Image (cartoon, rainbow, N blue to C red):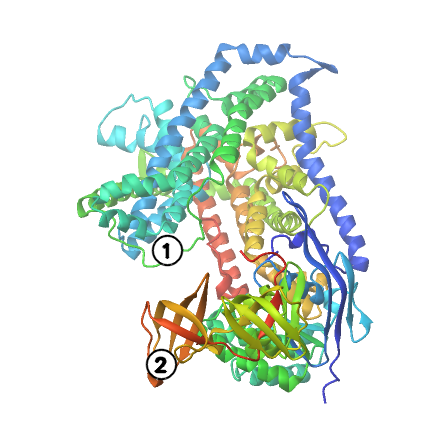
């Protein structure tokens, strides 16, 4: 019956004074969206294409034609391709093992923890651990094999570090897909005489091809936009676009070239988005409910294959845990690789010299967190549940800063807010705005997803019991979308603590960030404080997301609990 | 004492949906309906007949494209749902998952800012009425489907609404529970005497609980009446076929006078006591329920050949070919007489009364 046609009807009833407040709020929201999303991007385009008020393609063409920049583009694409393929394969192995290979509860927890770590760490963490392991004085290269003159910088280590950093995203995307494929499909194939491998090849794999494509594209996009890993590990022989754009701006003060280079990044990023939206989304054969199929068959793999899969996962998990252990170790010894005396020296450094950065970062993260959480559910509710002119435009615009590589957003903000009338660069405001508008879309998406699960009859039930729109929102809808609010809080906090690609263009003497400090330490070869900072960030993020999860648990009914924040 | 029940009147009610591909779709067409004070009226029909849309317009969840809705003479067409004073029971229950059973039932009372003491008393009363005494502290997720249905019912009646509306409330329950719940809903409605509109596609459910049933088809009411009216005196093939299984026995009118009509069915002369005015020579269809037919003695009745037989213990179902049509016959308690075999020639006793005769507009297919 016409439940789907229902929205075509206007619900009778108006909301007197509420309507005025609503109109004012809507106007304010649009102003914010225009100011912090549309305007900076427009400035970026103007800077790249216009010169003195005229369309000028000369600088554009010369930047593109420069052999070095073309190489950076090629390198970026190659790296993204490799990371996309390798990360998807590893993610699939993890997801398949977790869902089908009958892991114990403890092993499952360990895998979850190991895959969570890269997601909540500062972006340099893997890179630093790589240098510790494979650098000139690396634990593995030097101490274990005695190779002194190793070249750690280049494609191989960048690729490996990015793969370790990003494969958990593929794992998280693939696991619910595998969980939702009823094992009866595999059993059917098995019962028809196929081997387990045959069942996997002919049934499971084809069913998850859209999910695999999606995971690949996600990783491709992440690698393409990654700034931190190449900055540490790529070295001068392997330039990639985000680092080149950064160097143009900070090294040569050439804003236009930086802008154009960041726009070059937009071409493949846009292509990925197009392919994802056009060919992958909605192609899924399985409906993801987030709920595992009941009585999932746990022996879908042969005993031999199971051993291989589990070993592969254990190996990868060990590598990750080893990297983080190394990071911790480096933070508590005098000088990694030279002097192994235990010390708290580095922590002393970060809490004295580094204290301003810690205070600034926490201030920005803690201010941005509630703003981002609120912004997420407001926009999510407006887009997901109400109808107004420009709703679709609001949805698209609110996603822009999230979908674009951080380098583009950072340079756009730099261009837009460097001069009067909006000279905000270097203030806390701009850093907070950047994080809120770039990382709240997770909250928006979660809100929309939750709203889709809340049947309209909830609102109708409330209305039939005499409640008006405001009461209904406050007493029914708000409690139901609370998990989305917390998800938004979590993501904005985590990113405010760890992200760097956009904000590195916006820091100043007055306001700086831990991540920027880590980068400075790395370039000054002050590895100890860099490691200590990283450990500090990871601990803070774990504690805060833990507290958020606890609060969410306290505040919501058991039936409403969604997946954990940060995963 | 509760307030006196009120009448619901729908006048020229029309609902037009705009559909992306199909353009404007009329779900309800100029529907007129009077629901009597305290009456239990059921809108019965197949999916897409407009019954739910009608109910949602009565509730105020959807605005009619045209027509008026009156509650006891008061025009509520433009009144929002939250000011219509209705109790609505949803197909999916629509219980608030973040609230306890108590808080769900108390919701409407809290909105109306009743005192804590009154809320406690009325929630307790409501839960008692639906047999959930002592369940107040449970969370919704801890309840079974049937219990959730009871909470939804308690929540709707706790506010003492002027009108009770049900949207297929039992369709998510298993068969046994459905029968139990429908009995309770009927009992509760009789007790509260609140004017009730109930939507279902289940004809047995409709017949079991309603005072009157309105059978809907294509956005209109095909026929309205008591279960007996509709079953025994359907005014159209649609209604005859919709309620229960039936035979439409084709024949030609030989003669018709008040109180008596004679039909020719495949050469057999069938006299029916009916006040319907029919013209000699007219093609008609006589509505005869399979259980109203019986097997007669050899040579007396409509002759036919047994084509199929299903033995069900308490009854046996036959398909009997009489010339160009197949007549379905239900034989009750076959042990008492005898079972007829396939291919056997039988003579059907056609009833002389209680037969509705329908004119055939176009030649029967």
Is residue A333 visible from the viewing direction of this image? no
- Asked which quadrant contains residue A431, the reply is top right
Tell me the subunit letter for badge 1: A
- Quickly name the residue at label 2: B334
Q: Say what secondary structure mark 1 lies in.
A: loop
Question: Dot 2: within a 10 Å radius of its alpha carbon, few (fewer than 14), some, or many (20 or more) residues?
Answer: some
Number of residues whose C-alpha sits closer than 10 Å to that of mark 1, classed few (under 14), some (14–19) or many (20 or more): some
Q: Check the image and report above or below for A224 versus A92.
A: above
Numbered circle sitting on residue A293 = 1
Q: From what the image shows, is residue A532 above or below residue A564? A: above
Write the residue at 68% across / 71% down: A465
Point out the residue furthest to the bottom here.
B1
Q: In which quarter of the image is residue B37?
A: bottom right
Q: Point out the image quarter for the N terminus of chain B.
A: bottom right
Q: Where is residue B27 in the image (x, y as percent from the top left)?
A: 67, 56
Can residue A533 be seen from the camera position used here?
yes
Locate residue A116, reporting x and y percent: 40, 46
Contact, mark 1 vs mark 2 (Cβ under 8 Å): no
> Is residue B14 shown left or right of residue A275?
right
Residue at 62%, 20% (x, y): give it.
A255
Q: In which quarter of the image is residue B317?
A: bottom left
């Amino acid at each position: 019956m016409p439940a789907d046609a229902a929205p075509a009807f206007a619900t009778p009833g108006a909301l007197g004074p509420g309507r005025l407040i609503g109109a004012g709020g809507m106007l304010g929201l649009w102003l914010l969206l225009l100011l912090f999303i549309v305007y900076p991007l427009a400035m970026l385009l103007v800077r790249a294409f216009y010169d003195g008020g005229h369309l000028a393609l000369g600088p554009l063409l010369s930047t593109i034609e420069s052999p070095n920049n073309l190489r950076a583009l090629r390198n970026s694409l190659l790296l993204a391709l490799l990371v996309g393929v390798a990360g998807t394969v590893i993610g699939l192995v993890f997801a398949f093992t977790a869902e089908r290979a009958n892991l114990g509860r403890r092993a499952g927890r360990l895998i979850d923890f190991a895959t969570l770590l890269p997601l909540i760490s500062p972006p340099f963490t893997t890179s630093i651990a790589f240098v510790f392991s494979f650098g000139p004085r690396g634990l593995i290269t030097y101490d274990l094999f005695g190779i002194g003159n190793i070249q750690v910088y280049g494609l191989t280590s960048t690729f490996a570090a990015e793969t370790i950093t990003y494969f958990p995203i593929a794992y998280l995307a693939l696991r619910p897909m595998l969980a939702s494929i009823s094992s009866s499909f595999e059993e059917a194939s098995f019962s028809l005489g196929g081997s387990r491998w045959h069942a996997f090849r002919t049934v499971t794999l084809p069913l998850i091809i859209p999910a695999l494509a999606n995971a690949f594209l996600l990783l491709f996009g992440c690698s393409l936009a990654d700034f931190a890993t190449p900055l540490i590990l790529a070295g001068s022989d392997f330039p990639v676009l985000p680092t080149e754009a950064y160097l143009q701006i900070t090294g040569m003060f050439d804003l236009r070239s930086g802008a154009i280079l960041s726009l070059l990044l937009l071409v493949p990023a846009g292509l990925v988005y197009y392919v994802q939206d056009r060919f992958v989304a909605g192609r899924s054969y399985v409906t993801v409910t987030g709920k595992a199929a009941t009585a999932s068959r746990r022996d879908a793999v042969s005993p031999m294959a199971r051993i291989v899969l589990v070993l592969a996962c254990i190996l990868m998990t060990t590598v990750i845990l080893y990297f983080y252990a190394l990071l911790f170790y480096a933070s508590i010894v005098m000088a990694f690789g030279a002097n192994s005396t235990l010390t708290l020296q580095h922590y002393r450094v970060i809490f004295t010299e580094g204290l301003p950065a810690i205070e600034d970062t926490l201030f920005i993260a803690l201010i941005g967190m509630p703003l981002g959480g609120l912004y997420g559910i407001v926009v999510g509710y407006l887009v997901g549940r109400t109808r107004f002119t420009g709703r679709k435009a609001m949805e698209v615009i609110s996603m822009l800063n999230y979908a674009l590589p951080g380098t583009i957003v950072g340079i756009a903000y730099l261009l837009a807010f460097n001069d009067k009338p909006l000279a905000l660069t270097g203030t806390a405001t701009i850093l907070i705005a950047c994080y809120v508008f770039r990382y709240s879309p997770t909250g928006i998406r979660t809100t929309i997803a939750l709203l889709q699960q809340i049947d309209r009859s909830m609102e109708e039930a409330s209305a039939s019991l005499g409640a008006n729109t405001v009461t209904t929102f406050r007493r029914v809808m708000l409690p139901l979308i609370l998990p989305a609010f917390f998800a938004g809080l979590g993501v904005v906090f985590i990113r405010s603590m760890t992200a760097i690609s956009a904000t590195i263009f916006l820091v100043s003497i007055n306001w700086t960030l831990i991540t920027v400090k880590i980068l400075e330490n790395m370039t000054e070869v002050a590895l100890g404080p860099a490691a200590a900072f990283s450990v500090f960030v990871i601990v803070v993020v774990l504690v805060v997301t833990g507290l958020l999860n606890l609060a969410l648990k306290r505040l919501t009914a058991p039936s409403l609990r969604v997946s954990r924040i940060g995963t | 004492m509760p307030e006196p029940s009120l009448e619901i009147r729908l006048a020229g009610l029309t609902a037009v949906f705009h559909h992306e591909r199909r353009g404007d779709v009329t779900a309800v067409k100029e529907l007129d309906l009077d629901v009597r004070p305290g009456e239990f009226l059921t809108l019965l029909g197949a999916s897409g007949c407009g019954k739910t849309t009608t109910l949602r317009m009565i509730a105020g969840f959807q605005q009619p494209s045209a027509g008026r809705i009156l509650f006891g003479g008061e025009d509520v067409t433009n009144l929002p749902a939250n000011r219509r004073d209705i109790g609505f029971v949803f197909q999916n229950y629509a219980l608030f998952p973040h609230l306890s059973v108590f808080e769900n039932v108390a919701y409407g009372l809290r909105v109306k800012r009743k005192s804590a003491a009154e809320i406690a008393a009325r929630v307790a009363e409501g839960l008692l009425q639906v047999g959930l005494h002592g369940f107040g502290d449970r969370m919704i997720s801890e309840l079974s489907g049937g219990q959730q249905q009871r909470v939804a019912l308690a929540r709707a009646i706790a506010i003492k609404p002027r009108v009770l509306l049900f949207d297929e409330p039992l369709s998510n329950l298993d068969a046994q529970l459905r029968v139990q719940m429908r009995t309770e809903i009927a009992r509760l409605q009789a007790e509260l005497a609140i004017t009730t509109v109930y939507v279902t596609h289940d004809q047995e459910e409709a017949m079991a609980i309603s005072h009157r049933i309105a059978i809907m088809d294509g956005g209109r009411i095909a026929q309205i009446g008591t279960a007996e009216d509709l079953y025994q005196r359907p005014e159209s093939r649609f209604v005859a076929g919709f309620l229960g299984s039936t035979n439409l026995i084709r024949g030609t009118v030989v003669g018709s006078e008040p109180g008596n009509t004679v039909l020719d069915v495949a050469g057999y002369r069938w006299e029916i006591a009916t006040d319907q005015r029919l013209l000699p020579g007219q093609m008609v269809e006589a509505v005869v329920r399979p259980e109203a037919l019986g097997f007669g003695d050899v040579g007396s009745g409509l002759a036919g050949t047994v084509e199929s037989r299903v033995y069900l213990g308490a009854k046996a179902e036959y398909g009997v070919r009489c010339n160009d049509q197949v007549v379905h016959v239900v034989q009750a308690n076959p042990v008492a007489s005898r079972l007829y075999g396939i291919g056997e020639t039988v003579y059907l006793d056609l009833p002389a009364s209680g037969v509705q005769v329908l004119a055939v507009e176009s030649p029967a297919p």
